[in-house]
């Protein structure tokens, strides 16, 4: 998993000279970053918004911090972006090829069991369920995988224990259900409340078409991002200290993962919608600035993160 690689990469940033490579299917990209300012740059500072421009040593130090922190933000944002994209690609793989998912659902069976079992029985349409189970076992970023009919009815949910607890059986009203049908490609919801647990989640819908030439829509594969997984990952990064915070923020400014959380069942609560760093990131920009967060002066490096059709923001914050 790509997330496992980033901790090692970012740990190297704490040494003097950083040399790292990130594998890709096409090439290897090499980054080099020095942690000290060369003699020719002494007394020269970058124009960082919110920071008075001068030749003071403190501003030189902040300039170095900016370079280091922006590189961390860039690498981590790419890692998170790739991880989400890999999960969506897995959903597309089982939805757009000749797999059991592309076989028409058993609507007659669903009609007879939806009110009692909130979908089809646990042992029905097992090939589809097995694909969903395989995705859950390999992609920990998802907390459940489900199948929905084009009309919005729940067909099944994995884990099955989640299905039987459902009290909402049709999701045609959801934004992502409408968006996936209109766009004919993967679509991610806003942060919404899970109908079983009440916990926040973002749901990704992927259309499923009949593989017989006419490409008619026969279903929708759904998967919910596991915010607790992302939260635990951010807290596990080795360069995090008591005055540094990393937050993954959705396009509305809601923190979906936060390295400063102190429990294993993360509930997004803070809003960062008013921060200029957030506004810059969701506009596709990256950089650093100084601004006030909850009354504290903070040096923020920001970078956009593409999440399906959304642009999220990654914020690295250090108290100054």
Image (spheres, rainbow, N blue to C red):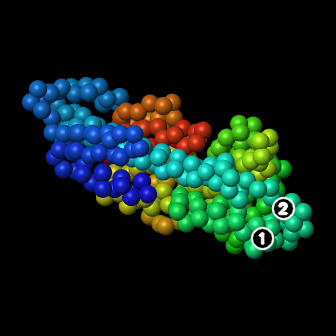
Of residues 292 and 84, the one nearer the viewer is: 84
| Residue 185 sits above or below residue 104 on the image | above
| Residue 36 sits above or below residue 101 on the image | above
Give the mark, 2 or 1, whose residue is nearer the N terminus: 2
In this view of the protein, can residue 190 be seen by the observer?
no
Q: Secondary structure at mark 1?
A: loop
Give the x, y percent position of residue 50.
Answer: 35, 30
Dividing the picture into quarters, in which one does residue 61 lie?
top left
Q: Residues within 10 Å of mark 2 (few under 14, many from 20)?
A: few
The total number of labels drawn is 2
Q: Quadrant of the N terminus?
A: bottom left
Side of 252 where 166 appears, left or right? right
Mark seen at residue 124:
1
Give the x, y percent position of residue 299.
Answer: 34, 40
Side of 120 where 49 appears, left or right? left
Of residues 47 and 132, the one nearer the viewer is: 132
């Amino acid at each position: 998993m790509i997330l496992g690689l980033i901790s090692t990469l970012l740990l190297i940033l704490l040494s003097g000279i950083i040399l790292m490579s990130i594998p890709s299917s096409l090439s290897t990209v090499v980054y080099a970053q020095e942690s000290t300012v060369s003699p020719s740059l002494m007394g020269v500072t970058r124009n960082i918004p919110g920071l008075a421009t001068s030749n003071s040593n403190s501003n030189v130090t902040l300039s170095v911090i900016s370079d280091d922190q922006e590189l961390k933000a860039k690498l981590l944002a790419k890692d998170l972006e790739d991880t989400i994209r890999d999960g969506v690609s897995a959903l597309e793989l089982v939805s757009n090829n000749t797999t059991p998912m592309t076989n028409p659902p058993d609507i007659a069976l669903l009609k007879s069991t939806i009110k009692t079992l909130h979908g089809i029985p646990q042992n029905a349409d097992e090939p589809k369920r097995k694909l969903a189970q395989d995705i859950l076992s390999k992609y920990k970023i998802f907390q459940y995988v489900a199948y929905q009919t084009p009309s919005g009815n729940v067909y099944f949910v994995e884990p099955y224990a989640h299905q039987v607890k459902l009290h909402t059986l049709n999701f045609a009203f959801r934004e992502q259900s409408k968006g996936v049908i209109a766009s004919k490609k993967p679509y991610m919801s806003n942060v919404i409340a899970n109908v079983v647990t009440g916990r926040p989640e973002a749901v990704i819908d992927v259309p499923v078409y009949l593989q017989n030439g006419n490409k008619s829509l026969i279903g929708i594969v759904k998967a919910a991002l596991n915010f607790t997984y992302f939260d635990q990952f951010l807290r596990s990064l080795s360069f995090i200290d008591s005055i540094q915070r990393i937050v993954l923020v959705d396009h509305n400014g809601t923190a979906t993962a936060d390295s400063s959380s102190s429990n294993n069942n993360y509930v997004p609560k803070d809003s960062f919608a008013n921060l200029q760093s957030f506004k810059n990131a969701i506009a596709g920009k990256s950089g650093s600035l100084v601004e006030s967060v909850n009354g504290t002066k903070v040096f923020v490096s920001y970078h956009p993160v593409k999440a399906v059709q959304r642009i999220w923001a990654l914020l690295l914050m250090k108290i100054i």
